[in-house]
Image (tube, grey):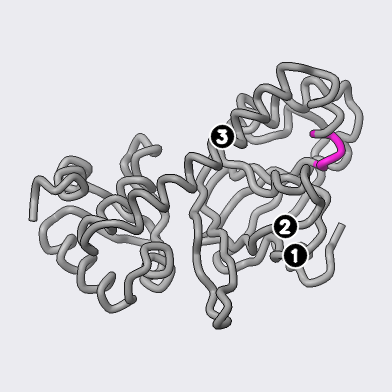
Amino acid sequence: MNMPGSDRSLGGVHALGGLGNLCPLCQGGFLGLVLRRANGEGLGGVRQATRQAGEVIYRRHEPGEAVYSICKGAVKLERVLPDGRSRVVRVLQAGALLGLELLADRVHHHTAVCVGRTQLCEVPVAVLERSALAEPGVHAALMQQWQGLCDECDVVISEFLTGPARVRLARLVLHLARIHPTHTCQTMSRDDMASLLDLTPETVSRTMATFKREGLVAEHAGVLACQLAGLEAISIGRLP
């Protein structure tokens, strides 16, 4: 269903015939558990979608009917400040869920935008609610998802908004790259990094250029490769 103000009509979207057609990450994760407990109800509403960089998944204050799991790529969550500027408040990657706030009040609390090419699995909120009410295991897993989102907020406050620019940027890059076996992540724009870290784009650009000269990061075709040991030393203040 296309909601007013959203860009959900864009990108490649197709309905799924059942659990087996979810991406492997979702099959083995929270959404897979939900669908196994759904007894076939509502599975016609399960969809996969491939979105492009800059594409809006949903907008703040927009009503919604589905929760999204990130299969590949990354999504930034934005809020608008009182002065009208948009501020990135979180960046979520593969395995994270988007839109859980719909379980509370049926409207989105952020604007969700794809950082790069992103693959999503979409499950109706109604399916999630039925499974959570009927199965204690699903309810417990849902609470774990909520706690994970709370932990992500703590990371932003405690790690990304404290310390010198060099330390903040090292922590952000580490946070994005650690979950990948190859120690790589999708490249974010300098403006988005600056917004998340409460720095200026110029400061982020200069610091990233220094990281490149020092061999700590390398960028190619939208992918950022990281040298974890050096970045970790910077993130805890062992290196200037």
- Tag 1 or tag 3, which sits nearer the N-term? 1
Pick whichever, 157 or 191, lies toward us: 157
In the image, 166: left or right of 60?
A: left
Disc number placed over residue 108 in the picture, else none? 2
- Tag 2 or tag 3, which sits nearer the N-term? 2
Q: Which kind of residue does numbered mark 1 sit on?
A: His
Q: Residue 228 is drawn in which quadrant?
A: top left
Disc number placed over residue 147 in the picture, else none? 3
- The residues colored magenta run 124-128
Element marked by disc 3: helix
Q: Which kind of residue does numbered mark 2 sit on?
A: His
Judging by the rendered image, the residue that carries numbered circle 1 is 61
Residue 133 in the image: state x and y as whole percent. 84, 25
Pick whichever, 152 or 95, lies toward us: 152
Find the distance from the CA under tag 3 to the CA under tag 2.
18 Å
Residue 67 in the image: state x and y as whole percent. 73, 45
Which residue corresponds to the image point at 81% horizontal and 52% vertical from the top-left? 106
Classify the position of the N terminus by image quarter. Answer: bottom right
Which residue corresponds to the image point at 40% horizontal and 37% vertical from the top-left? 179
Classify the position of the C terminus by image quarter. Answer: bottom left
